[in-house]
Image (tube, rainbow, N blue to C red):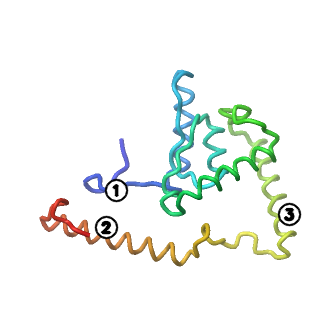
């Protein structure tokens, strides 16, 4: 089965598919022969996302929606973030952690939660406030601009969809 909109003109991408993508990478790595590379695709917008794809077994990671929104500078940012994560966790090369995701356990979940809480408290102490979960701007663009552009794109797609439903064809359609 596939997830797609009417006629296949659109589908899901970006953060909406990240967890499905991670599960698929993990499952494909377990099912396929080691000679077949698995590429992590879906929802990669940070070094953490890339780290998680590789942890699930991806040999490479694709960045799509983030590149569309942020532009090519996202690649350097994601690589820098991935290097920082590797350094913090004591990894020297990607092969040190590729495909090493552990099965879920209560103990592991509790340890992970404790680490996240400690990091949250540390960030609150550094910032001097309690607004740790306050949303941050997306990349170098204010969120309002990104939202406005997304609304514009949605409006154009709805207009195009209406145009096609009324009997027009894509070859007749002019932006």
Q: Residues within 10 Å of mark 1 (few under 14, many from 20)?
A: few
Q: Residue furthest left?
A: 167
User: Horizontally, is 149 left or right of 128 in the view?
Assistant: left
Badge 1 is on which residue?
10
Residue 102 visible within the image: no
Residue 67 to residue 87: above or below: below
* Of pointers 1 and 2, the one earlier in the residue sequence: 1
Picture residue at 60% right of the left edge, 68% below the top: 138
Structural distance between the alpha carbons of marks 1 and 2: 9 Å
Please report whichever mark, 3 or 2, sits nearer to the chain's N-terminal start.
3
Question: Quadrant location of the C terminus?
Answer: bottom left
Residue at the image point whose x is 78% and y is 55% from the top: 116
Q: Tell me which numbered mark, 3 or 1, is placed earlier along the sequence.
A: 1
* Mark carried by residue 157: 2
| Mark closer to the observer (3, 2) | 2
Left or right for 143, reference 55: left
Element under label 2? helix
User: Residue at the location (45% across, 54% down)?
Assistant: 13
Quadrant housing residue 153: bottom left
Q: Position of residue 92 (x, y in %)?
A: 78, 37
Q: Residues within 10 Å of mark 3 (few under 14, many from 20)?
A: few
Residue at the image point whose x is 56% and y is 74% from the top: 143
Whole-angstrom CA distance, mark 3 to mark 2, is 44 Å
Query: Quick check: marks 1 and 2 in contact, CB under 8 Å?
Result: yes
- Closer to us: 132 or 70: 70
CA separation in Å, label 3 and label 1: 42 Å
At mark 1, the secondary structure is: loop
Q: Nearer the viewer, residue 124 or 139?
A: 139
Q: Which residue is mark 3?
A: 122
Residue 155 x, y percent position in the rendering? 34, 73
Q: Is residue 58 left or right of residue 153?
A: right
């Amino acid at each position: 089965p596939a997830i797609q909109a009417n006629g296949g003109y659109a589908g899901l991408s970006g953060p909406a598919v990240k967890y499905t993508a991670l599960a698929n990478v993990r499952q494909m790595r377990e099912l396929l022969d080691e000679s077949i590379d698995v590429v992590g695709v879906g929802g990669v917008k940070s070094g953490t996302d890339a780290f998680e794809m590789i942890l699930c077994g991806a040999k490479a990671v694709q960045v799509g929606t983030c590149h569309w929104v942020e532009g090519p500078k996202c690649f350097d940012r994601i690589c820098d973030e991935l290097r920082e994560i590797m350094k913090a966790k004591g990894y020297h090369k990607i092969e040190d952690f590729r495909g090493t995701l552990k099965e879920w356990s209560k103990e592991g979940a509790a340890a992970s939660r404790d680490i996240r809480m400690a990091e949250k408290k540390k960030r609150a102490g550094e910032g001097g406030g309690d607004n740790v979960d306050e949303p941050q701007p997306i990349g170098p663009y204010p969120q309002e601009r990104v939202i406005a552009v997304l609304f514009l794109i949605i409006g154009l797609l709805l207009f195009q969809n209406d145009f096609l439903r009324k009997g027009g064809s894509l070859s007749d359609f002019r932006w």
